[in-house]
Image (spheres, rainbow, N blue to C red):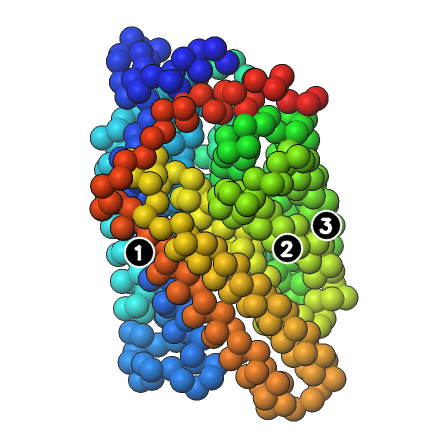
Amino acid sequence: MTQIATSLIKPVVVTSRGETRVLVDTTSSLLHFAAAVAWIGVGIVAGLLYSFVFLRLYPNEGVEWLSPGRVRMVHTNLMAYGFLTNAFIGMLHWVVPRLTGEPVLSHALSKLIFLAWNAIVAAAIGGILLGQAQAIEWGETPFWSDHLVVVGVALVVVNFCWSLIRSREKAMYVSLWYFTAAFVWTPLVYIMGNYLPQTLVPGTGGAALVGLYIHDLVGLFVTPMGWGLMYFFVPVITRKPIFSHAISLVGFWGLAFFYPLNGVHHFLWSPIPMFAQYGAVISTIAVEIVVTTVVINFVMTMRGEWGRLKDSIALRWFMVGMTCYFITCLQCAFQTTLTMQKVIHFTDWVVGHSHLVMFGVFSFWIAGVIEHLWPKLTGRDWWSRRLNLWHFWLWTGGVALMFADLTVIGVVQGLLWDGLRPWEESIRYSEIGWFFRMISGWMILIGFICLGANMLMSLLARQEHSDSDYAGQFVEAQAGAGGTRD
């Protein structure tokens, strides 16, 4: 740890090639976080606009390029590629050089990646609005944009793998395990999901690949990035080592072994061979058990530190996200069974579940990272703690309302359909829940406004932020308490 500790404290390092370079590209981190927040704002507006359809309040009726189907695809794709991807790249610029002691391959390449990636996102969204989307769930981006995405992902992988290959540490910390795996998995998953069903594998075989793509995009890209950032920032903020390094590796290998087999559970009771469906059910339950061990690891890390939640809004985001993750995993272990699928398939239960995991978990963790890093990236303290609190409570209340509301609606819908009741009856009951879903959307939008305004005002503020002690916090957390507890 000594070499990394030294490199963390210094703003510049002598690389393994003998070059003197800045260790951390804070400008790229700031730009990616700012872009992520801008894109999620557009995505939230698109999602809220789409919710008006169910209450017969949609304001753009008859406008082809703003038709509800296209607006929904804008909402989902901006969350995945505009918000999550930008935020993760920003986080990687902060974390990877600190854990390896080596800067990325090129800071100039980092700026190019920022410009190119966001241009690709904007172009893909434009293509969707013009009706050029593919008929692939979570792969609706126009086929011509997929080639650009693959090149962009390759550049990201090369830029960060340079630091990993030249790391000064012989043993990689668990965050780097997750990041490295994501660098390998993500290109493979994206190519599989966007090229094979579209061009080579039609019918039920293509549907099986789409199912794998839907779930592997979450499990082999979003999840490794999310867990990696948690394994870094929780010890930094609490100044404690992670409870068990061994448990963290159990979670990693469990994710690697079971998650790639989950995807077919999106197509239970379909013409896909039953052995594949049974395998998806078993592997889904297995991975949820493994994930629970990871949740336990973080709960034990927080032992004796729960009082920090009063002062640290970042830790609040992390722990609420952890709670949502546990609920999501527990729910998934039940809902993936063939028996329960008879009731909830095609209902709003699934929509509530997906919002809880993608928004209540990973977006909350990213919000916690932004809460923690924005003052360090801008050199300015937060303009208003009250706005950050409003942001936290509005998003927490909004996602809780949406999840509970859609879960209840889903059960009601499923039971009515299973009982062969008239379709109109299920619509009548659902409209009550759809109204509260719209309310939750407004809460999330107002929370976003609080975040965006606070980030902008903090950037413009004159009060400087003092962060001289941050450099050694991670080393102190991991080594100062005797390492891990294994």
Q: Does residue 328 lie above or below 304 as drawn? A: below
Instruction: Residue under label 1, please give it.
Output: 453
Viewer-nearest residue: 363 or 75: 363
Instruction: Residue under label 3, please give it.
Output: 285
Residue 257 placement: quadrant: top right
Please name the residue shown 41% across and 61% down the image: 447
What amino acid type is highlighted by mark number 2? Thr
Query: Decide: marks 3, 1 in contact (CB < 8 A)?
Result: no
Marks 1/2: CA–CA distance: 31 Å
Viewer-nearest residue: 114 or 5: 5
* Residue 236 in sight here: yes
Residue 4 placement: quadrant: top left
> How many numbered marks, from 0 up?
3
Tell me the mark number nearer the camera, choosing from 1 and 2: 1
What amino acid type is highlighted by mark number 1? Ala
* Label 3 vs 2, first from the N-terminus: 3
SS at circle 1:
helix
* Label 3 vs 1, first from the N-terminus: 3
Q: Residue 31, percent across and down? A: 28, 42
Q: Does residue 121 lie above or below 225 as drawn? A: below
Instruction: Residue under label 2, please give it.
Output: 328
Marks 3/2: CA–CA distance: 12 Å
